[in-house]
Image (spheres, helix red, strand yellow):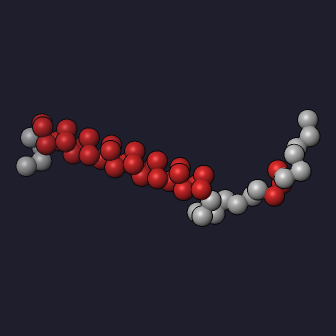
Amino acid sequence: MTEPPDAAKWTDSTPSDPGITVVQVFAYLVEALLGLALVTAWWRCGLVS
């Protein structure tokens, strides 16, 4: 199987790459939601006032 002629040209892995940006935003949202769920659980158990 041969690669398309433009396959080697796409090597942008900097933060300005839209794919990298989408992954970083998704990771941030997951981390924020997990943190919120953890604090909410602590608050419901009375560990945080």
State the residue at coordinates (32%, 44%).
Answer: 33
Task: Residue at 84% x, 53% y: name it.
Answer: 6
Residue at left offset 53%, top offset 49%: 23
For the point 12% across and 47% down, the residue is 48
19 lies left or right of 12: left
Q: Is residue 9 above or below residue 35?
A: below
User: Is residue 38 toward the left or the right of residue 43 in the image?
Assistant: right
Foreground of the two, 1 or 35: 1
* Residue 41, percent from left and from top: 19, 38
Q: Position of residue 11 (x, y in %)?
A: 75, 58
The relative height of residue 25 versus residue 14 in the rendered view (above or below) is above
- Tally of numbered discs: 0
Q: Does residue 2 appear left or right of residue 32 in this picture?
A: right
Pick whichever, 49 or 20, lies toward us.
20
In which image quadrant can residue 10 be found?
bottom right
Q: Percent position (x, y) of residue 36?
A: 26, 46
